[in-house]
Image: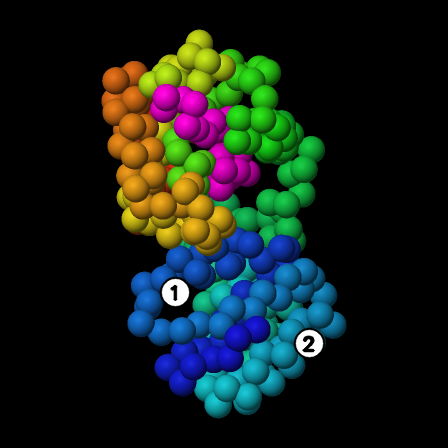
Amino acid sequence: MTGVEAAGRTVFFVSDGTGITAETMGSSILAQFDQLRFSHRRLPFIDSLDKAEAAAREIEAQGLADGKPPVVFSTLVSPQTSQRIRQTRALHLDLFETFVGPLERELGVKSNHTIGRFHHATDSEAYKNRIEAINFSLAHDDGQTAINLNESDVILIGVSRSGKTPTSLYLSMQYGLKIANYPLIPEDFERNKLPAAIEAVKAKCFGLTIDPIRLSDIRNERRPGSRYATLENCRYEVATAEVMMRREGIQWLSTTTKSIEEIATTILNTLRLGR
């Protein structure tokens, strides 16, 4: 773990499950304070008093080392473990307490207070669909195969290193969508046509493009000094790809300044997708 700068804080994400929910929500909130540096530490599976005691000692020790109280985001369901964590000297932000209490009052129903309930849904149809979607996207990454492309929800196309693979996997893991992705390569630019394998499923295509300067920087990290990474070649590929997508009536967006989450959300909204 990196050291904490004077203006920053250590942030703990404490959960009786994986801690992913706490970290995702907490990180979204902390992003509003980008002038500060935060050191993240996840404490998952705090599902007993013994584990809560150990977590509390760790939080206390970090506060002493930093000379300032840590920030603690928690999604602990058990009142006993939650109470022990809340006894530490820290800023406590209980995400379940924030949302579950008001919902109970509004709905007139008590929550189940079941530990790890979300992650026990492994036998559900939605979970199975998500696993199937991830396997599909991995098999259809970077144009590896054209088999069953008609089963895809979206086929992402674009020049190499424009963000197709991470976007594909994010959409599969978060939304259970079957995503294929195809790189546009020099042969496609020479023919000035889409890859033959995706011509028949063009209606499922969505394009990603990127600023040529940014693309050159990314490619130089992978293959420094190559023609593949030159700014001249990047400008040519991006311009030709955009002309091709425009001509074929394929919607597209620039990934230059967008996060994976923003790219995925734009695709979902544009194509009206989601399960």
Identity of the residue drawn at 69% across and 76% down: 54
**Residue at image x 40%, y 22%?**
188
Q: Quadrant of residue 81?
A: bottom right
Q: Considering only vertical position in the picture, is 222 above or below 34?
A: above
Residue wearing tag 2: 53
Identify the element where label 1 is drawn. Answer: helix
186 magenta-colored: yes
Q: Main secondary structure of the magenta part?
A: helix
Measured along the vertical axis of the image, is residue 274 above or below residue 103? above
Please tell me which residue is depicted at 51% across the width and 68% down the height of the picture. Answer: 40
> How many C-alpha atoms fall within 10 Å of the one at disc 2: few (<14), some, or many (≥20)?
some
Where residue 183 sits: x, y (%)? 45, 30
> What is the three-letter code of the residue carrying label 1?
Leu
Where's residue 245, x and y in %? 30, 23
Q: Residue at x 37, y 82 (%)?
A: 7
Cα distance in 3D space between marks 1 and 2: 26 Å
Marker disc for residue 30? 1
Q: Can you see residue 98? A: no
Q: Amino acid at mark 2?
A: Glu
Upstream in the sequence, badge 1 or badge 2? 1
**Side of 247 where 182 appears, left or right:** right
Q: How many marks?
A: 2
Q: Residue furthest top?
A: 200
Q: Is residue 228 above or below residue 25?
A: above
Q: Position of residue 144 (x, y in %)?
A: 58, 26
SS under mark 2: helix
Please say whether residue 28 is one of the residues in the magenta stretch: no
Where residue 207 sits: x, y (%)?
Answer: 35, 29
Q: Which residues are magenta?
A: 165-190
Classify mark 1: residues with Cα within 10 Å, few (<14), some (14-19) or many (20+): few
Badge nearest the viewer, 1 or 2: 1
